[in-house]
Amino acid sequence: MLSRTEHRGVCGLLSSVMSGTETHTDREEDYKFLHSMLMEKKLHLLFKIHERLKRFEKRSAVPVQEHAAGLASDLVEELMHQGRRVEVEELVALLSNPHFKSFLSVHDTVAQRDFEPALPPIPDGILEEDEDSVKIVSLFKTKDPLGATIKRDKSSGAIVVARIMRGGAADKSGLIHEGDELKEVNGVSLEHKKPKEILPLLARSQGEVTFTVIPASTKEEVSSSKKLFVRTLFDYDPKEDPAVPCRAAALAFKRGDIIQIVSTEDDTWWQARCHGDGDARAGLIPSQQLHERRVALQRPKALFKPRRVKPTDDEEGTVVFPVVEDADYGAITGIHIAGLRRSFRLGRRGSRARAAAQSRRRSAGADGSVRTPTYMEVVPYRREPRDRHRLVLLVGPSGVGVNELKRRLFISDPDRYGVTVPHTTREKRRQEKDGVDYRFVSAHMFEEDILNHRFVEYGRYGGHYYGTSLDSIQRVRAEGKVCLLDVHPNKIKHVYTAEFKPYVVFVKPPRIEELRLTRRRAKFICDEEDAKPVRIFSEEDFEDIIDSAETMESQYGHLFDRVIVNGDVAAAFGELKADLEEMQGAEVQWVPAEWICSSPMKARRSCGHFAGWI
């Protein structure tokens, strides 16, 4: 029997836990839930049952009979032959009461110690030699799917489990595995049935669903202890994919989404879930290999579209020319912007066409292959207060408005943003200041820095060198500012390192119809070789902008963190500014895993699963 001390100990423990939940306010909701649970009447009834069982255990009681229900039934039958006395009728009614019968049945179960559940019999039609390999699995189904797909085995014709979706009910149960053969569902035989006939049967099922399963041969699954996250580099909508095995089990995503890869066992269809949905059921996405094959079957129009301009063989680094700005922004805003008085963007249509031709040749590698954007492995990065700001790279075709967006961004908050001061070897003019307009250096020093790879971008114009150095970027960052830099995408590689951690924004032109409307009166400064120093955009310019953007995106799209369409410059600027503020204020930023020493994908690359960018 439970002693008073023991009883007080259990109740005292409960009382102390309840009082302890009232003194915590830091996690008020959790403690409120715990307190309400401890106040439940059912819990207190369980304590009473516990007390009675303890008493029973101390007494070591032994049942007098193990078949009380049978004796009661025999007694009722004997009493029926007795006279109709009031006492007999009352006793018969008591023994025939359903509640009393249930009580006697429980008594017999306890007395006989028959506590094991009764399993349903093995269905007919299962061969005796297969009995050991057959199992009956019960899963509880809610409104959500069970998280498994089925298919018909081509060789045997059997219905088998095609895949188990990570995080679903089937996966959490651990009772059903890929390759298991399904014989029955809720007692309905699946023999000679097609998968499309079985799916409605499962969809209608609610609550407990019972499967008769012949397990597949067990195999050890090798799972990585590290989580693998990727940034998607293309849009995917399973509704538009006729090849997806099961649309209901697929995961849709947009370019730039962060998703977690949970299974790559299938070479064609991987399993993934959106970042933040740790307990959600995984969905199917095209594997890297599948998406690359699909893209390879399409002819990239940016590579094969006929061009009007004959490509030149200019060497890399000689296509950048200084262009005089057509406005004095210092006079307009009262702020002198170093690095914006001279732009290193291409200004003349012919120069732009030559640059586009070079981009097309670079977009095809040495073997003629084109890099297909699929998935890029990323890891979370938390910026410490002592860390410098990430470099912001703005890239896009000449004429799309990259320099204008950079100018507006700087003017909007000059205390936060800074721009680089370019280097040059030409003579300083009377109104110019060294270190403000340009950094004037000798040709020997400039060429020495070229050999030491100290320039992100450089070129020659009028017999003089012009360029943007790595040191000029570091000077801006050392001031605690976000350095804004616009370069050609083929120069990103010079700063695509853990030191700079660049955030790359691709400024994309709108459709050509919108380009015509928004730029029909816009003017730009041409090179001195042109007869007209200032002219408006032509139809040929618009086509060059569109074609150049397509080439850049097909070749360097895997490096772009953000794509902004610059149709209306005010709207594009607002979107860019909001995006950069969100990025800089985020507690966690996702950066390429190649900037971090150890990552799960590096091990996979060595096994051949992920070659290069995924």
Image (cartoon, rainbow, N blue to C red):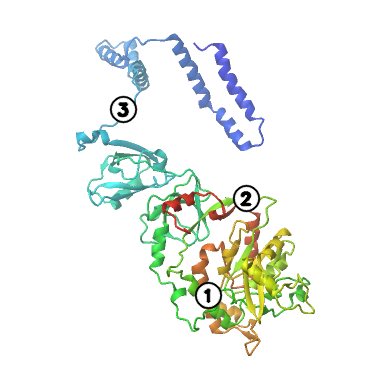
Q: Is residue 611 above or below residue 548?
A: above
Label 1 crowding class (10 Å Cα cut-off): few <14, some 14-19, many 20+?
many
Q: CA distance from mark 2 to mark 3?
A: 56 Å
Give amino acid for label 3: Ala
Judged by depth in the image, the label closer to the viewer, 1 or 3, is 1
Measured from the top left, where is residue 357 in percent x and y?
Answer: 51, 78
**Among the two numbered marks 2 and 3 on one chain, the one whose residue lies closer to the N terminus:** 3
Residue position marked by numbered label 2 in the rendering? 382
Q: Counting residues from the N terminus, which is met first, the one under dot 1 or under dot 3?
A: 3
Tag 3, which secondary structure? loop
Look at the numbered discs 2 and 3 and tell me whether their residues touch, using CB distance below 8 Å.
Answer: no
Give the label on residue 26, or none: none
User: Above or below — where is 67 with respect to 514?
Assistant: above
Question: What residue would you read off at disc 1?
Answer: 548
Instruction: Identify the residue at horizontal 33%, vertical 20% (top origin).
Output: 114
Dot 3: few (<14), some (14–19), or many (≥20) neighbours within 10 Å? few
The one of 517 and 234 positioned closer to us in this rendering:
234
Q: Looking at the image, is 79 positioned above or below residue 448?
A: above
Asked whether residue 404 is in view, the answer is: no
- Give percent across and percent down for residue 382: 62, 50
- Disc 2 crowd rating (10 Å Cα; few below 14, some 14-19, many 20+) is few
Asked if residue 597 can be seen in this view, the reply is yes
Q: Quadrant of residue 582?
A: bottom right
**Residue at x 64% of width, y 61% of height:** 391
Cβ–Cβ under 8 Å for marks 1 and 3: no
Please tell me which of labels 1 and 2 falls first in the chain: 2
Judged by depth in the image, the label closer to the viewer, 2 or 3, is 2
Label count reads 3
* Amino acid type, residue under disc 2 in the picture: Arg
Q: Quadrant of residue 135?
A: top left
Task: Indicate which disc residue 118 carries.
Answer: 3
